[in-house]
Amino acid sequence: MTRPGKLTYPQTRTVDQIDDYFGTSVADPYRWLEDDHSDETAAWVAAQNELTFGYLDNISYRASLKARLQELYNYPRYSAPYRRGDRVFFFKNDGLQDQSVVYVQQGLDGEPEILLDPNTFSEDKTLVLTAFSPSRNGKYAVYGLSEGSSDWQTYRILNIDTRETLPEVIEWVKVSSPAWCGDGFYYGRYDAPEAGTELSSRNEFHKVFYHRLGTPQSEDQLIYEDPEHPLRFHMARTTEDEQYVILYISDRGQAKLGNAIYVKNLATGDTEFTPIVDSITDETYGVVDNVGDSLLISTNKDAPNGRLILVDPQKPTEEHWQTILPERPEPLRDVDTAGGKIFASYLQDVSTRVYVHSLTGELENEILLPELGTAGGFGGQKDDDFVFYTFTSFTTPGTIYRYDITTQHSTVFRAPELTFDPSQFETQQVFYPSPDGTRIPLFLISRKGIERNGKIPTYLYAYGGFNVEILPSFSANRIALLEQGVMVAIANIRGGGEYGRTWHEAAIREKRPIAFQDFIAAAEYLIAENYTNPDKLAIEGRSNGGLLMGAVMNQRPDLFKVVLPGVGVMDMLRFHKFTIGWNWIAEYGSSDNEADFPYLYSYSPLHNIRSDVPYPATLIVTADHDDRVVPAHSFKYAATLQAQQSGYAPVLIRIGTKSGHGASNLTKALEETSDIYAFIFHHLGVEPTFA
């Protein structure tokens, strides 16, 4: 009998599926939900969405909230321009366009023209522009298309002079960026699936090809394959002058965080790749540019915070490496070159610092930024005399600056014209202790002058994995929270890259629970410091952050009022069996390994749900086209949590259509955000007012 006030959930069939992991029997009663193409799963999805959207429809201000989000987002947004040949390219969104539009102009003072408008690709706006790469001379561009924001791409080639798309179609592209060289480009793809084979199974034997303009894909030249290692990724890049082809090889399925790197010097007629680093370990290497016949390479080899070295491919062994930028106390986040200079970006307590160096490493000056925040985009051509970069913070929308290399001076090139006043809000950065004493950064964004009374409705977000930094950046969406008195808290927990390789590796594999401890400590800090309390605290994380949400809710269901796991990795015993999930073994480990199974099982969100615990209000978010973290993770997790929930708080799952790991267009993104925020407001007791 259903207790008063408790939702009645759709019936989910169970099966007698028991797996043996090194003598431990593990039930998987919802295994059938892994087949997201079956009629039964489709019926389950429809029933769950009917319940979820029926629940959300009863929140009276949901439509007004969506309208407010549209108002906040409705301002022009630009990317920084960049040059190829005598043409300049940039992206622009007028405000509420589902996808940003590609513009081109002759020189910096030319008249901008629409070059490619992805909003015209399909009637429902779910055919997504995933890549745009002009050739070195600016006459052609490769652009990538994805259906519903799937990771699978199709490449097309645009003749920029005539605005015509060439007839050839490049299919089955994945884990790839086009790398121009001469009258064609390098790219990575998998073989086409055999008839009757599921697309999701085609994630083995990644290959690099060269496509020559004007020829069919069937004539593309195979550049590199490795039949002995089916789960490796191979990425081709070229230097700006197209002298070198760089081949990166990674093997994360074998728990290796780093990469090997091979090169081919086209100027000397090389026909084979030769190694710079031929073994794959946990060290990473990335070519920044070539200086003559030598290569500038950023690496964390013997430098957890990163350094820049110069390597002669004719003498690639480590004793011949020349250090150009030695390791600093702050992590090296990015290195670019332009105009004969090196632009090095570092993170100092999760805020960007940018320095300009000569090509031999001498420090010339720091580029002073307007406030604590994030800057990026300093790359350019060797003959440029200025570069563009973008600066943003939690309360400053993306502003484009022009930096003159000769005068060492920055000026605003393009600032957004907003329909709201971000100066009403403020950001403070605090640091809190994790249980082991580690000092963790926490950003707090709120209305100016908000009273610390222990009752502030608070939204806490984190990611904590894959060396990803959560940096200060502006979000019009967050304004909808802030203007209703909600405080936004961003925790830079371990597992990310905010403090370099050491910070990342502190919370990988068997040490993953450290990230959970860091996050729980953030919530406890906010309560102890009288900002909020458990009845006013909502938490969200997506992808790896969705795993974080599931784990911390299992461990401390008493600490949160609302939990929002988005596109999460929830089944830690089977994640590596779907699409490219094996690529995460380097981060998580694998249940196929007897040493890894116990710790994965101990925190796996799906496997640690209890029947005697009242869980917080939970809105799980996923999408039908997510072929990165497949929706089966969220399906099985939702079915289990609904069956085990002993409390009255709702457990709902929102399953987006024609979207992938992220929303396929702005309309769908705003719809999803309005549903999430309505759920937050409803359960935190926030009664929003909209002007």
Image (tube, rainbow, N blue to C red):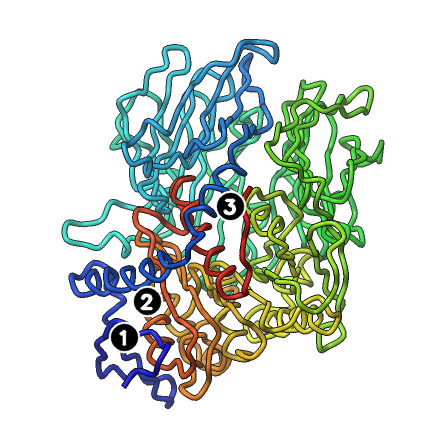
**Pointer 2 with pointer 1, Cβ within 8 A:** yes
Category of crowding for the residue at label 2, using alpha-carbon neighbours closer than 10 angstroms: few (below 14), some (14–19), many (at least 20):
many
Q: Label 3 belongs to which residue?
A: 248
Q: Is residue 208 above or below residue 162?
A: below
Q: Label 1 belongs to which residue?
A: 30
Q: Is residue 245 above or below residue 83?
A: below
> Does residue 229 appear anywhere in the picture?
no
Q: Label 2 belongs to which residue?
A: 635
- Give the Cα separation between the discs numbered 3 and 2: 35 Å
Name the element at disc 2. Answer: helix
Left or right? Give the position of 40 relative to 587: left
Left or right? Give the position of 308 relative to 170: right
Q: Is residue 99 above or below residue 559?
A: above
- Give the Cα separation between the discs numbered 2 and 1: 8 Å
Q: Position of residue 195 (x, y in %)?
A: 14, 49
The disc labelled 1 sits on which kind of residue? Tyr
The disc labelled 2 sits on which kind of residue? Phe
Name the element at disc 3. Answer: strand
Left or right? Give the position of 223 relative to 219: right
Residue drawn where x is 39% and y is 67% of the image: 575
Q: Nearer the viewer, residue 85 or 618?
A: 618
Q: Position of residue 56 (x, y in %)?
A: 38, 58
For the N terminus, the image quarter is: bottom left
Residue drawn where x is 46% and y is 70% of the image: 617
Name the element at disc 1. Answer: loop
Category of crowding for the residue at label 3, using alpha-carbon neighbours closer than 10 angstroms: few (below 14), some (14–19), many (at least 20):
many
Q: Position of residue 680 (x, y in %)?
A: 50, 61
Q: Give residue 110's mark.
A: none
Q: Nearer the viewer, residue 600 or 568?
A: 568
Q: Position of residue 444 (x, y in %)?
A: 70, 56
